[in-house]
Image (cartoon, grey):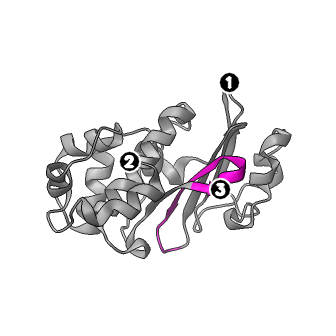
Amino acid sequence: MYDRGMASPTSASLPHPRDLERICRGLATLDAIMSSEWEARYYSFNAAWDPAAQVRMASMRNGSGDDWFIAFTPHGTFVKAFWHEHPLTPAATVYAGLPAALQPQRDEPAFTTDQVTWGGWHDGSAWTLRGDPAPLADELAMLAGDAAAYRDYAAAYFEATVPLEVIVHVLAGAPLDASIVARVNDERSLAELRADLVEIGY
């Protein structure tokens, strides 16, 4: 496990869902390049989580009981985060006023939404976010596209040095080629990543 410790609180906001989704795809892609084993990755993205409803899902699981889930839907974006060593915020408080169109995400068993530290939604015009963001300071930096935050995570968790400009390239959703993959992890090839990239939709 990568122990980030208690970072200083950061902004409790998130980027616009369009940018957030691109960053989440990039984080999942970087982790896929870093590790061939899905279970060893923190970040994942499923571009076909619910094809019928056109829902894409990003997630983070650190293996120690902390996680976040973000569902991107045609009707808005749903966010739920749980940090096991920090006080919960009642789910009824976090999701009070949740648009009806996002209620299926509130009820999604995979998100275990009764255990919430911080979360909320974007209704197409603005974010509504409630709870304690302090435990998620590093995650919020990552979700804002802070390449240095991913570099620090990769150094601590994967014991790898990833060039900052390569992380910026992937988080921007720029095209991948063999040289970019090799600069992230020279033991992985673009061909090996094909299935992961299809799942991520990168």
Circle 1 sits on which residue? 125
Q: Secondary structure at mark 1?
A: loop
**Farthest top residue?**
125
Question: Is 173 positioned to the left or the right of 19 in the image?
Answer: left
Disc 2 to disc 3: CB gap under 8 Å: no
In the image, is residue 118 part of the stretch drawn in magenta? Answer: no
Q: What residue sits 42% from the left and 72% below the top?
A: 38
Circle 3 sits on which residue? 117
Q: Secondary structure at mark 2?
A: helix
Q: Secondary structure at mark 3?
A: loop
11, 34: nearer the viewer: 34
* Circle 1 crowding by C-alpha within 10 Å: few under 14, some 14–19, many from 20: few
Circle 2 sits on which residue? 26
Please provide the residue range marked out in magenta.
48-64
Where residue 67 appears, as percent x and y from the top left, is 55, 63
Residue 140, compared with residue 197, is above or below; it is above
- Locate the N terminus and report the quarter of the image it occupies: bottom left
Q: What residue sits 83% from the left and 52% below the top?
A: 92
Q: What residue sits 19% from the left and 63% below the top?
A: 160
109, 143: nearer the viewer: 109
What amino acid is at disc 2? Gly
Where residue 96 appears, as percent x and y from the top left, is 83, 43
What amino acid is at disc 1? Ser
Which quadrant of the view contains residue 49?
A: bottom right
